Image: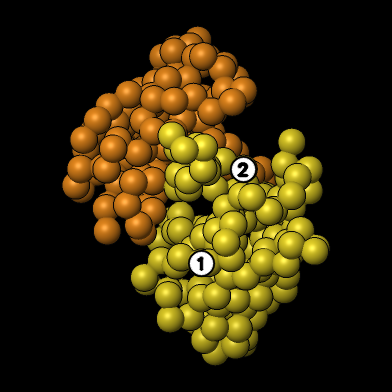
Amino acid sequence: QVQLQESGPGLVRPSETLSLTCTVSGGSISGYYWSWIRQSPGKGLEWIGNIYDSGISNYNPSMKSRVSISRDTSKNQFSLNLSSVTAADTAMYYCARVGYYYDSSGYSRIWNYFHYWGQGTLVTVSS
Amino acid sequence: EIVLTQSPGTLSLSPGERATLSCTASQTVSNNYLAWYQHKPGQAPRLLIYAASDRATGIPARFSGSGSGTDFTLTISRLEPEDFAVYYCQQHGASPYTFGQGTRLEIK
């Protein structure tokens, strides 16, 4: 069974960049779709963005100007960068594998529910 | 963006009872693409239901989803001790993909 593990600094200074990595085991990241989600006391669960098998990313408009998601297939990892952080970015950050289905032509298509999740990593933004 | 409102906020029931959790969307959920998750403290959230009524692999048959349009329901037919947790709905039909605020299912 696929397993995901988030890693990265637990404390980030305001205005700096938050960087997290998700390491996937039990399967390859190639051929699948991956996502970052966060949970803060003030806003609940919030989808941050996806990265597709093609390497193209799709982001929540509320954070689009500050977010970048990338992947490293050689390490079986994908990463999140969130720039210019403030206290409002304090949250538990989760990585997840996105659901998919096969269309009538046999191609996989993204189906934006979150099938497998990591346990999350808490990031606090504070000076 | 679609706002999802879950009710009740907290549901107190006993093992063996039936649980009914609601999720109401601020606008029609495209293709009824609504998912449900179970979340226990310190654990990864677990997918239960997607596309309103399709059970994820390995999910017991006591969990069922129903609904369409803007009103959706997660039913747990007969509560087991391990079912007490927080449950979230999520619409996966239109970006940005949004979640409800959760229903806490606690032991009475």
To which quarter of the image does residue A111 belong?
top left
State which mark lies toward you, 1 or 2: 1
As drawn, B67 above or below B96: above
CB contact under 8 Å: marks 1 and 2: no
Q: Chain of mark 2?
A: A
Q: Residue at x 46, y 74 (%)?
A: A88
Residue B62: x %, y % from top left = 49, 14
Secondary element at tag 1? strand
Q: Quadrant of the N terminus of chain B?
A: bottom left
Q: Residues within 10 Å of mark 1 (few under 14, many from 20)?
A: some
Residue kind at label 1, given as amino acid type:
Ser
Residue A85, horizontal then vertical, whole percent? 53, 82
- Chain for colour orange: B
Q: Position of residue B21 (x, y in %)?
A: 36, 29
> Which residue position is annotated with label 1?
A57
Q: Amino acid at mark 2?
A: Tyr
Residue B15, position as x, y percentages in the image: 52, 14
Q: Which mark is residue A116?
A: 2
Chain letter corresponding to the colour yellow: A
Same chain under badges 1 and 2? The reply is yes
Pointer 1 or 2: first along the chain: 1
* Figure coloring: by chain
Q: Chain of mark 1?
A: A
> In the image, A48: left or right of B95?
right
- Residue, x 76% and y 58% (percent of image)? A76
- Residue A48 vs B2, above or below: the answer is below
Sort mark 2 into few (<14), some (14-19) or many (20+) by Cα contacts within 10 Å. Answer: many
